[in-house]
Image: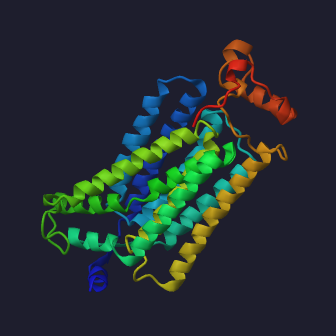
Amino acid sequence: KMGSRLLATASTSSFWWVGVLLDAVATLAGTAGKQLLRHASVTRKLRYYPMGLFCTAVIDPAFDISAYSFAAQSIIAPCAGMVVVWNVLLAPITLNERLTASRKMGAFLICMGTICVGLFGNHEEVERTVDEYLALFARPLALVYYALFAVWSAVCLYFFYRGSDLISGFVVGAYGGSLAGNMFTTKAVVEMFECILTSRESAGCETNPFLTAYPYLFILISLTLATVSLYLLALALTKFEALYMITVFEGFMIISGAVSGNVVMGEAQGQQWYMLTLYAISIGVILGGLYILCRGEQKRAKGQGDEVRMLQINDAKSSSCSTAETGVSLRELEATEEAAEPAELQPCDESLAASPAR
């Protein structure tokens, strides 16, 4: 009964492109904020933290939430891939970070996969009551998703404590992105707000949803997920350069957002099989880009290739090897590193030899 009710109230959203544009602004602000957080962690200049958090935690979500009122979650979530585009364009200039072959290829595949996910995703909107949202979130398929996500959480926790620095740093960023992608409660609240602001009397808007406790519970869940994911991203940025870690974070955000949108929100209902197949292939392209990025990092960390290195807080250039003290620029220092063996790199100050605590 509920399935036919939901499909019967579905309508094509002709303004989904407005949601995409709003999310483009959101991702630009988010990119600037994440790079400010990265800059603060490397230079130890604490004044950049509030600036980065304001862009990431205020401007970004404000435009992002607005975007959800124009398009389905399975369309907006993949738009997070635009962060990769902004980051690739800006980070070499703003953070002096090198754009390697693995980063170029990985970012390209993620962006192409993001575009395809948006094209083959669901462009329909469904109006629901609070009871229908509760029934939607409690469907057997949704419960399976929650169980699998719990398993994924346990796997990330295990590798965080038992894995190498490279693996533990990766799972922190990946899990943070996975949490950030679960935006179905946000989508539900945005639709409820639309009922109030537009005074719609169509199906799903017969009564004020905010006279119940559930919208406030959804808001609490959304804020919790956003806060925890931002903390995990900030932690991961102390171990990796922004071009790599932000790409990993956004990639997993795209995957979890696309999957939860289709599974939990039921946005796959009524879609043609070939559209769902193309949608799944697009997700695979994103995963391929992530794999290329990870392989590049591992080769560099093992000294087997000229890929990007994993950044540690104990790197000499983070403090005592700054330009002010040595007269050597960051690009010159990186060029010197490329000519040296990994074992020859030593911190300029023995006090920097200790790795940061998780």
Q: In which quadrant of the rendered view does residue 130 lie?
A: bottom left
Q: Nearer the viewer, residue 236 or 43?
A: 236
Residue at horizontal 66%, vertical 25%? Answer: 318
Q: Is residue 200 above or below residue 101?
A: below
Point out residue 276 in the picture as x, y percentages from the top left corner. 51, 79
Residue at horizontal 71%, vertical 43%? Answer: 99
Q: Report if residue 184 is visible in the image.
A: yes
Residue at horizontal 13%, vertical 63%? Answer: 208
Point out residue 321 in the picture as x, y percentages from the top left corner. 71, 19
Q: Quarter of the image for the N terminus: give it.
A: bottom left
Give the number of marks.
0
Q: Nearer the viewer, residue 231 or 205?
A: 231
Point out residue 57 in the picture as x, y percentages from the top left corner. 40, 41
Q: Report if residue 267 is visible in the image.
A: no
Residue at horizontal 79%, vertical 25%? Answer: 346
> In the figure, is residue 54 to the left or right of 305?
left
> In the figure, is residue 102 to the left or right of 248?
right
Q: Quarter of the image for the C terminus: give it.
A: top right
Q: In this view, does 96 lie above or below 13?
A: above
